[in-house]
Image (cartoon, rainbow, N blue to C red):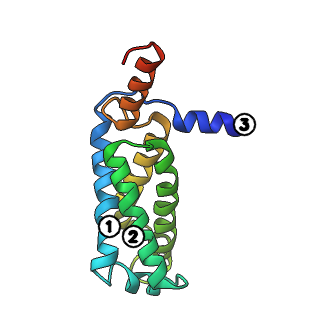
Amino acid sequence: MINTILRFLLKPADAPGSILLIRIAVGLIFFTQGILKYIDPNMGVVRFTRIGFPHPYFTAHFVGTFEVLCGLLLLLGLGTRLVSIPLLAVITTAIATTKVPELFRANQGFWYMVSDARTDFAIFCCLVFLISVGGGSWSLDARLARHERAGDRGIP
């Protein structure tokens, strides 16, 4: 079972090159949000403190570093499926800790939360898509797979 999951996650991308557009959008969002966790305390330590995360300084910088690195990997299309899984956990945590509580605040409620969560929901759906199809033919994943297949045929 684990072998099947690993084979799927590391399977070469046979999907169209246009998936690059989704990788660019999601990769840049995570990359820039990761940087913001370092340069803007309100987006990093202060926000993590307000949400109630333990050790907010460490947590904000850990998540920021993670988002920067994984965002870059998505932009390159390297390990797309594998990198998308923990990012899915990050965005799910963001929805659960920042959007769902809006349901229970005065003057907010369901429609406010739906409007505020639209970007997070779109990222969530894009990550599920990237997990299912991979990085596309314009990715380092696909390039490495082509190089590996060429090497299997004895082509230098």
Q: Give percent across and percent down for residue 100.
A: 49, 70
> Marks 1 and 2: which is nearer the front?
2
Q: Are marks 1 and 2 in contact (CB under 8 Å)?
A: yes
SS of the residue under disc 3: loop
Of the image marks 3 and 1, the number of the one nearer the N terminus: 3
Q: Quadrant of the N terminus?
A: top right
Q: Give percent across and percent down for residue 20.
A: 29, 38
The answer to which quarter of the image holds residue 43 is bottom left
Q: Are marks 2 and 3 in contact (CB under 8 Å)?
A: no
Amino acid identity at mark 1: Gln
Farthest right residue? Answer: 1
Q: Which mark is residue 64?
A: 2
The answer to which quarter of the image holds residue 18 is top left
Amino acid identity at mark 2: Gly
Q: Is residue 39 above or below residue 10?
A: below
Q: Give percent across and percent down for residue 13.
A: 43, 30
* Mark 2 nearby-residue class (10 Å; few <14, some 14–19, many ≥20): many
Residue under pointer 3: 1
Of the image marks 1 and 2, the number of the one nearer the N terminus: 1
Q: Residue at x 34, y 64 (%)?
A: 115
* Mark 1 nearby-residue class (10 Å; few <14, some 14–19, many ≥20): many
Residue under pointer 1: 33
The answer to which quarter of the image holds residue 17 is top left
Q: Between 112 and 42, which is closer to the camera in this rendering?
A: 42
* Mark 3 nearby-residue class (10 Å; few <14, some 14–19, many ≥20): few
The answer to whether residue 105 is visible is no
Q: Residue at x 44, y 53 (%)?
A: 124
SS of the residue under disc 2: helix
Q: Between 121 and 47, which is closer to the camera in this rendering?
A: 47
Q: Between 111 and 61, which is closer to the camera in this rendering?
A: 61
State the separation of the CA atoms marked 1 and 2: 7 Å
